[in-house]
Image: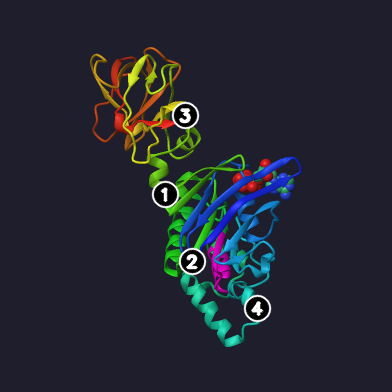
Amino acid sequence: MDLSIHDLVKRFGKLTALDHVSLEVAQGSFVCFLGPSGCGKTTLLRVIAGLEEADGGSIRLGESDLSSIPARNRNFGVVFQSYSLFPNMTAARNVGYGLECRRWDRPRMQNRIKEMLDLVHLADQAEKLPSQMSGGQQQRIALARALAPDPSALLLDEPLSALDAKVREELRIEIRAVQKRLGITTIMVTHDQEEALAMADLIVVMSKGRIEQIGTPQQLYREPATAFVADFIGRMNVLPLDPGAAGSYRFAGTPLAVATLANGTANAATAAALGIRPEAVALREGGASGENILAADVRSVSFLGNITRVELAPENRPETAIVAELHGTATVPETGTRLAVSLPADALRVLS
Ligand SMILES: Nc1ncnc2c1ncn2[C@@H]1O[C@H](COP(=O)(O)OP(=O)(O)OP(=O)(O)O)[C@@H](O)[C@H]1O
């Protein structure tokens, strides 16, 4: 069943943590709430879970209105950042906890516990206490516990952020595989854009209690609608526009042509800046003549293994750095040289 969130408002005293938030989560999809600390993503998840009451708006799961249903009856599996396993219970008993509460009979419960431990590849850890397991193993047990009662959706609140980088990457793949195998609707809160890009079908970017943009990872990367999204998802050069006539774009005195995207985002009326990804900036030696080409001096060059990052100071606007990323065997320029910097029309994005 699809989850429908309409016009949610949540206030804590004078602070508006959720400011008229609406979104649709399709059955079986993996959705990430992504944004900086304090943007409201955890509050949104907690309101969906029923752990926080909204001040306005509605949440529906299929045809049923969840607003008046208490958290324990919403049938959502929840996993928090801290593993929150019961320390005095074995892994198997932790997994079976929700089933005991629902009074499953013993054989059925044992079968389900085994099935869930197999699902997270921890059948051999069944009799261990949480303190005898690694952080990653504990979080997999927490996932198995949340999934055991066959919830209608899985809600994950920064489940990977307490883990070290390598375990985090392994668990990303594992959680996604489990989610796909079960086809369970999943919402995950994260402040880690890489995690969201790697895992989600759909990312909801939030800022200050509002939704900035909703899209697939590819859409958000290729067609960010605002400077905030452009900056938050990957790296983006943000070029503030020179004041000028509506319908034209000019940066550092150079007129720039911008290709119109299928979704029509190249709209001069709301333009505040142009954005371009560092990998799309092309560098050449020689004079800056031709369309979308400006002169800039190489300010610094950083070799980073698979890429070399070049920071450039445009001739007419040296305070706005443009970063280019060169791959593999590209010729690396010297610091201090003047180059022609090409900003291809089809790579420029209009940001509001
Ligand atoms: N119980 C509460 N009482 C008062 N203010 C709260 C409460 N819970 C959250 N807030 C405030 O609401 C805003 C949104 O908080 P929320 O935890 O949803 O943000 P977040 O995006 O999840 O941030 P983080 O990544 O730091 O957890 C913040 O300004 C926070 O201080």
Mark 2 lies on residue: 184
Amino acid tagged 4 = Arg
Tag 2 secondary structure? loop
Q: Is residue 95 above or below residue 272?
A: below
Mark with earlier residue (1, 3): 1
Instruction: Depth check: give the residue in front, 305 or 62.
Output: 62
Left or right placement of residue 304 versus residue 172 in this view? left
Mark with earlier residue (4, 1): 4
Label 3, residues with CA under 10 Å away: few <14, some 14-19, many ≥20: few
The residue segment tinted magenta is: 140-155
Q: Name which quarter of the figure residue 99 lies in.
A: bottom right
What number is the disc on residue 102? 4
Instruction: Depth check: give the residue in front, 130 or 93.
Output: 93
Amino acid tagged 1 = Thr
Tag 1 secondary structure? loop
Determine the CA span between mark 4 and mark 1: 37 Å
Labels 4, 1: front one: 1
Q: Is there any visible trace of residue 124 in the rendered image?
A: no
- Name the residue: 53% across, 55% down: 188
Determine the CA span between mark 4 and mark 3: 54 Å
What number is the disc on residue 216? 1
